[in-house]
Structure formats: structure tokens, C-alpha cells
Amino acid sequence: MLHGANDPFGCVSEALQLVEENLARAVRSREPALTDISTHLIDSGGKRVRPMVTLLAYFAFGGQRTQDIVDIATAIELIHTATLLHDDIIDGAETRRGKESAFKKFGLKSTLVAGDFLFIKAFEFAGKFDESVVQWTADACTLLTEGEILQGHFNRNRAVTIDDYLEIVKRKTASLFHTGAKVGAYLAGAPSSFVDEAERYGLNMGIAFQIVDDILDVVGHVDLLGKPIGMDLRDGNPALPIILAVLNGDSAVCDAFESGKPSEAQIAEALAAIKTGAAIQEAKSLSKRYAKEALKSVKKLPPSMYRNGLKTLVQLIIDRDF
Amino acid sequence: MLHGANDPFGCVSEALQLVEENLARAVRSREPALTDISTHLIDSGGKRVRPMVTLLAYFAFGGQRTQDIVDIATAIELIHTATLLHDDIIDGAETRRGKESAFKKFGLKSTLVAGDFLFIKAFEFAGKFDESVVQWTADACTLLTEGEILQGHFNRNRAVTIDDYLEIVKRKTASLFHTGAKVGAYLAGAPSSFVDEAERYGLNMGIAFQIVDDILDVVGHVDLLGKPIGMDLRDGNPALPIILAVLNGDSAVCDAFESGKPSEAQIAEALAAIKTGAAIQEAKSLSKRYAKEALKSVKKLPPSMYRNGLKTLVQLIIDRDF
């Protein structure tokens, strides 16, 4: 990826460094287990896309109080990390970001409590702001839980539609993107129409981000992803390429998706079928459609290197291979 | 229990009713599973001791804005409920308050997410207040998680001391009592020495409360408790009567406590040994010592029916059989 003055990392790199310092401080606990579990995940190289969107939106609207936006960006990353810990319990995931998952390494009980701990730390950061910011942050978290339940409902369930998928993604993935962007614009003092535009940006780029994630679970590389491919099929997750292949009537994919415990041969066959069919291309088109919507919002923002950062970020999200 | 003008229930019954209404509203979700799981536990007759302490402390110091204190009392009960859902997952508990536990009824995944959901709702309520209140509420939650980890460390571990026990209880049980009392006094505008006194009251009565809980797990009755007795021995929890019996050198209790999966015969023998030994009397003395400390704080408060309520509550806590 790029690293220059106008790229999304370069133009907020100092603030991102402060987010890292906040994260490291936030997870200090008198109980080493809580610090160890939190650090295990936080230090394993997350992309920090959510804090980045939050910071870029703030600076794009002329925000000046770096420490404020760093605190709310930290809250957003902490919430994301908390949900990853709990998601790994729910999915029984063995690996995450190329390492043993916290769930596998530290066990269910401590990982569950560490997730709670990170949620609490997030609200310590978010609680410093006015009622709107607290409410939007809480709303994003509520959406995350409601997304998790909806996703569970469509686990191994071939009745799932594209609309169901988009609803899950809006709740589970896009919520922290659009909340970060919205809070960033709001705290920078942007007029409410721009706050809405920032929110739309976050929503659309969050959906594009998740679609690419789903595609990479089929066509990605284990070394770059930090986890085996085909996890969605193994877990029965209603990911977009699976849904599209099912809708296209692919019986190998249907069988693997609906099977309580698909064999490795079934998964390999289903992955091959998804790759050779139209699903990946269809999914890519859809991700590009949402990326294009996000770019429309970017165009409406005042010109700055941060606006350029928001634009480049969309492109990087679409083109990434991890 | 009493129900009159000067008893703890009677004198805050209207505000407690508003807490119930808040709780019912808070758990509404577009995902029926989240509402069902939350309601399953909230409607199962919790004692609402934590909101009661919060409300009594507020009114005892002349607080007038009922809706404010009702909101924070709601937050405290929501946090308590969230931890019960997660605790039942951690303990693999089958029953809670005389009903099937949410974990048993709805499964791990949905129960975990519902616990997160309730934490979030709690912070929605708490986030309306100033930074001190948010920080204290978050601190109480952090203590809860740190208490859970410390308790896990001493699970089936006979190295546990009375000091370890008190540290666990301060974190896991007393935290929401002392935070509720402290926030109540603070929001009522009490001078800081009184805010500290209210906090001390909550701390001491919270410890007394937990000791009585531990005693009831040995000598209580299943129909009143809503769960079988002997659960602490089954789960290997470092409860006070067990610790005291172990310190008194009772080998049947040691064996049952240390055993990974004690038989029903082992548990029955250990319970009988605890009952015939000195542990229960010793535990009762300790609970009375903390109750007495709580009453010392009450004496320092300005006279009112709410002060009387705080006093009677301590007595009810000590004398209860459920």
C-alpha cells in the first residue's frame, strides 16, 4: 500500500500513532490476563481502517483538536476488537490475523471477559463526549449485536437473500465505519448535511469493505489473510459469493453451505465451483457499486489532502488482497 | 419482607416502578431474540437491590430529579443483568432465579450477544451524565471483569485466602453497590465527604450481601433460592464457607472443592461437613461485621425515611433466606 503525504495512512499517521498509544494504555489492567488477551489481538496487525476513516473525516472538515478525535477513534477500534473476541467464541475460530485466536489460546471464559473489558474501555473514551456522540456510538454497538443475531438466523440457511445480506453487513460491518465518519464530521463542526454525507461515505465504503472480505475468503491467500480460506463455508456464514452461487443454483455450494459439518472435500469442491461460476465477478461488481457511491460522497467534501485520503482509501479497500 | 412507608421498598416504590419501565423499554430490539433473552432474565424476579441502594442514597441526600436517578439506577441493573448472562455462560449454569438459565434455554451464542446488548444499553443510560459518573460506572464494570478473572484464578484452588475472597467480592459484587450509592449521593449534590460515606456504605453492604449469598448456597432452600444448593462446590467457586472449611482443615470439603468434577455424594458430604463445622457461624459473624460497618455510615447521614430505608435494607440483607 501507499505511504505518502496524500495517502490515507500518511496524512493521519501521527494521529494513528496516538490511537496506538491510547489502545496500549486502555488495555492495562491489574489482571494480566485481560491485558494479555487484549494485547494479543490489538498487536496482531489490524488494518485500523475504522480509526482511519474517523480521523480522515474529522480533518477533512477542518477539525483541530487531535486528542478529541484520537479518543473517539480509539473507542471505535476498541469496540471492533471486543466484537472480534466475542465473534471468535461464537464461530469457534482457531485463527485470527495469522495467529492462534485468543479464544483458542486463552479459552472461552477469559476471552469472553476480555471482550467485555474492551467494550467498557471503549465507553470510557466515548463517554467523555456529548450525548449525541455517546448515543451514536451506542447505536453502532446495538447494530453490531443485532447484526450478529441476524447473521446467526441465516447461518447455513439458503433462504438468505441479497437484501438480507446487505442488512447484515450494514449492521455488522458498516456500522462502525459510518459512525466513525459521522462522529468525525460532527466533532469537526461540519454542517449537518456534510455530517450526513460523511455517514453515507462510511456506510457505502463499509459495505464495499465487507464484500471484498467475503471475496478474499474464496480467492485470497492464507499467508496474506492470516487465516485459511473457505472459513465462511466452514462456519456456514451467509457471505456474498456463497449467496450468489446458491442463487445461481450451484448444487455443490448449496450442499456445503447447508451441511452442518461440510467435509474438506465438499469445501474444496464448493470453493472451486464459486471460482469458476459467476459469483465472484458479480460480487466484485457489487463492491464496485458501493465504492462508487462512497466516492460520490467524497466529491462533495471540501478539497484537502484528507479528502484525497478518503478517496484513495476506497480504492485501496477495493484493490486489496488482504 | 416489609412493605411500608419507611421500609426500603416502600419509600422508593414509585422510582423503582420507573426503573422497571426503563428496563422494559431498554431491551426492545428489532431482533426479537435479544428482547426475549433479556426479558427472560429481567422478568424473573431479581431483587433490584442495586437500583434500590442507588435510589435511596440519592433521596437520602435530598435529590429531586427522579428521572435522572432512575436512569442511572437502570444502568446499574442492566450492567448487573449483562454480567449474569455472561456468568451463566462461564459457569455453564443450567438454572437462574428458579428458571432455566438463558444460556441453557437460548444457547451460548445468542446469550453472549444479549449480554453485550445489555452492556451497551447500560452505557446509553449512563452516557447522559457528566464525565465523573461515566468514569465511575466504567470503573465498576472494569472491577467486575477483573473480579471475574481473579475468581477464575482461585477456581478449585485451595490456596485462596480470606483476603483473596474479599478482593474478589469487592470487585465482583460490591462494585455496583458502592458505585450506585456513590453516584446517588453525588447526583443529589451531597458534599464529597458524604459521597465517600455513601460509597463506604455500598462497599460494606455489598460484601455483607455476597457473604449471605454464599451462606445460602449451603444452608438455603432450593425453592426460595431458585437454584439448587451446593452450586459453589459444583462450580469450584471460592465461596466463603468453603474457604473457611478448607482453612479449618476439613478434608471432605477440600476434596470436593479441588475435584474437577465432584460426585453428588462428595458434594452432599462436603455440604454436611460445612454445616456441622464452624464455617457457617464464622461466615455469619463476618457478614454481620460488614453489616455493622454499613450501619455506621448510615448513622452519619441526615435523618430521613430514606436513611431509615438504607438502615432497614442492611438488616433485610442479613436476615434474608433468598
Image (spheres, coloured by chain):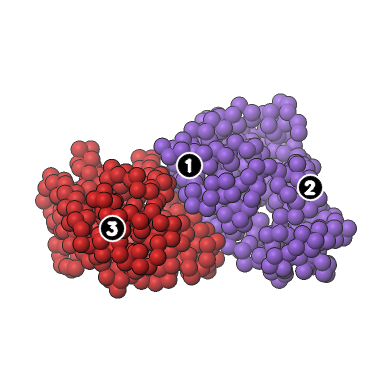
Chain colours: A purple, B red
Q: Nearer the viewer, residue A286 or A159?
A: A159
Q: Residue furthest right?
A: A276
| Rendered image quadrant of residue A172 | bottom right
To which residue does mark 2 refer? A220
Q: Identify the disc placed on residue A178.
A: none
Q: Nearer the viewer, residue A178 or A47?
A: A47
Mark nearer the viewer, 1 or 3: 3
Q: Which residue corresponds to the image point at 49% horizontal and 46% vertical from the top-left?
A: A114
Tell me the subunit letter for badge 1. Answer: A
To which residue does mark 1 refer? A34
| Rendered image quadrant of residue A40 | top right
Q: Which residue corresponds to the image point at 81% horizontal and 50% vertical from the top-left?
A: A219
Residue B121 shows in the view: no
Q: Amino acid at mark 2?
A: Gly
Residue B4 shows in the view: yes
Q: Amino acid at mark 1?
A: Leu
Q: Are marks 1 and 2 on the same chain?
A: yes
Q: Which residue corresponds to the image point at 71% horizontal and 26% vertical from the top-left?
A: A5
Q: Are marks 3 and 2 on the same chain?
A: no
Q: In whole angstroms, how far apart are the C-alphas of marks 3 and 2?
A: 53 Å
Q: In whole angstroms, how far apart are the C-alphas of marks 1 and 2?
A: 32 Å
- Few, some or many residues within 10 Å of mark 2 (<14, 14–19, 20+): many
| Rendered image quadrant of residue B280 | bottom left
- Element carrying mark 2: loop
| A321 up-or-down from A157: above or below | above
Tell me the subunit letter for badge 3. Answer: B
Give the x, y percent position of residue B54. 27, 53
Q: Quadrant for the N terminus of chain A, please.
A: top right
Q: In whole angstroms, how far apart are the C-alphas of marks 1 and 3?
A: 26 Å
